Amino acid sequence: MLIVGERLNVSRKGMEALVRGRDEAAIRAEAIRQVQHGADMLDVNAGALVGEEPEALRWLVATVQSAVDVPVCIDSPNPAAIASALEVVRGKPLVNSISGEEARFRGLIGLVKERGCGVVALCVDDEGVPASAEESVAKGSRLVERLLGSGVPPGDIFVDPVVRPAGTDSGAGVSALEAVKDIKRRHPGIRAICGLSNFSFGLPHRSLLNRTFLVAMMSAGLDAAILDPVDDRLHAVIKAAEVVLGRDRNCARYVKAYRDGKLGSA
Amino acid sequence: MLIVGERLNVSRKGMEALVRGRDEAAIRAEAIRQVQHGADMLDVNAGALVGEEPEALRWLVATVQSAVDVPVCIDSPNPAAIASALEVVRGKPLVNSISGEEARFRGLIGLVKERGCGVVALCVDDEGVPASAEESVAKGSRLVERLLGSGVPPGDIFVDPVVRPAGTDSGAGVSALEAVKDIKRRHPGIRAICGLSNFSFGLPHRSLLNRTFLVAMMSAGLDAAILDPVDDRLHAVIKAAEVVLGRDRNCARYVKAYRDGKLGSA
């Protein structure tokens, strides 16, 4: 499981002030902390800084890269902000995200191809967000075919089913699970990614719901998740799920995490 | 999810003495406690009392039924003990278990049909325990076909894939998950059941592994699990998994469990 740390996002409490104030030390510390907690990649998002996003996102990427070696996941709906960040990026980033919305697709496909980035393919188009598994699959499949047709290698495509809140839609979980299974079956070699926290929006004990949803999504074939790596219980459940799904030979990583005190009170 | 409480089993610490001493008050209290913690059915097992099992199991069933109204799951490899317990049973019990072992099948099929019991169908035959998902599916499918051919209704058959310990076999989880999915696909209407605790045998933080395995098994289509209902974290994760799997309309049971303080510190 590829763990994408979600904490460098200006919509999170306290982050906007740090980015506006260009607080390098704090951003670097947050980057290092997430990597120490097992993040394989760091999401960076400055979307709330209207008008200043391209410059802020570019600064965020440069600052994070001055602190850690993991790749960045450049998170914006705005092709201009992504282009700005790509100018300073090192290594192979993940662009988060392209979609079937015409302007967004056209604005990003050239950059993605030119730079050989990975890309999150959001199951959304100009008709809106999917309301069912069938709509996720239909919107996602059209987008994946278009990306493949444009020459993006399957392994660079991370399809995101768009997770809806269970609190307003009891079918939200099944819809995301079925979409991941179905899209991966139709398009061998592509990968699946999602954010967790939207699922539990508006419900109590969100962390419990998020980690339970994550186990089900991993069982359905999820390859990567955007989450808070500092949440110890989430970390513990990922280690346990890797045992359940046969991805931890001789349970070596699970037992090591236990010995390192990283499974919490379990 | 049908929750079968596992605590009335003489192989559990302290239980053998209670059953040998015919301690009615203690057994009744344990039965009541499990039902108060959400058990839909209670497993009773006196298998460790060699030579005395039929009489002990019969006493256990009668004692449990004097305390609670939920059905019992009569747990024994010994057809004579099951027959003895069935003489005093009320309601529709679950016989745990029949298998493809010839003597066990012949010893139980008549009782199961005559009494109209539910039956756990263990994916084991005279050639032994399955070593892979394929073997579970092959052994399980043969047994299910034989039960159906004998006139047992599909909804009364609870197939058990036989969970192996992940500590000695990294493929144990995938094998159980695939067996449940495959056997249920082949035989519409039948149900799947398993015990949890064997999965984590020999590994640290067993409760974490057990509940993570349960979420994955529920995602694969598990209908019932034999588990410790008094384990609050297991209870919380079942409630969360029912939200994830779209089985909790408007998240009503989840929110109620939260309000009742039953989701723990989550």
Image: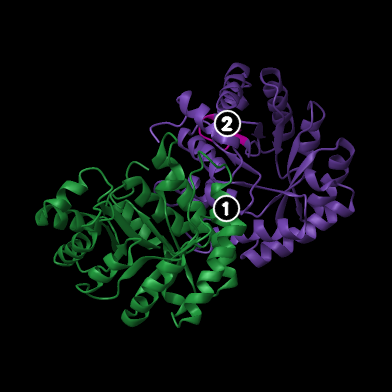
Chain colours: A green, B purple
Q: Is residue B125 visible?
A: no
Q: Is residue B244 magenta?
A: no
The chain that hosts pointer 2 is B
Q: Quadrant of residue A36?
A: bottom left
Q: Is residue B223 left or right of residue B92?
A: left
At a point 52% along the width and 39% down the height, the residue shown is A168
Give residue B16's mark.
Answer: 2
Q: Position of residue B81 (x, y in %)?
A: 76, 37
- Is disc 2 surrounded by few (<14), some (14 to 19) or many (20+) residues within 10 Å? some
Q: Is residue B184 visible?
A: yes
Q: Is the residue A237 above or below the residue B185 in the image?
A: above
**Nearer to us in this view, B224 or A116:** A116
Q: Is the residue A81 above or below the residue A49 in the image?
A: below
Q: On the rendered image, what quadrant is the N terminus of chain B found in?
A: top right
Q: Which residue is mark 1?
A: A175
Give the structural element (helix, strand or loop) at label 2.
helix
Give residue A138's mark.
Answer: none
**Nearer to us in this view, B29 or A36:** A36
Q: Which amino acid lies under the numbered mark 1 shown in the image of this protein?
A: Ser
Q: Position of residue A88 (x, y in %)?
A: 19, 72
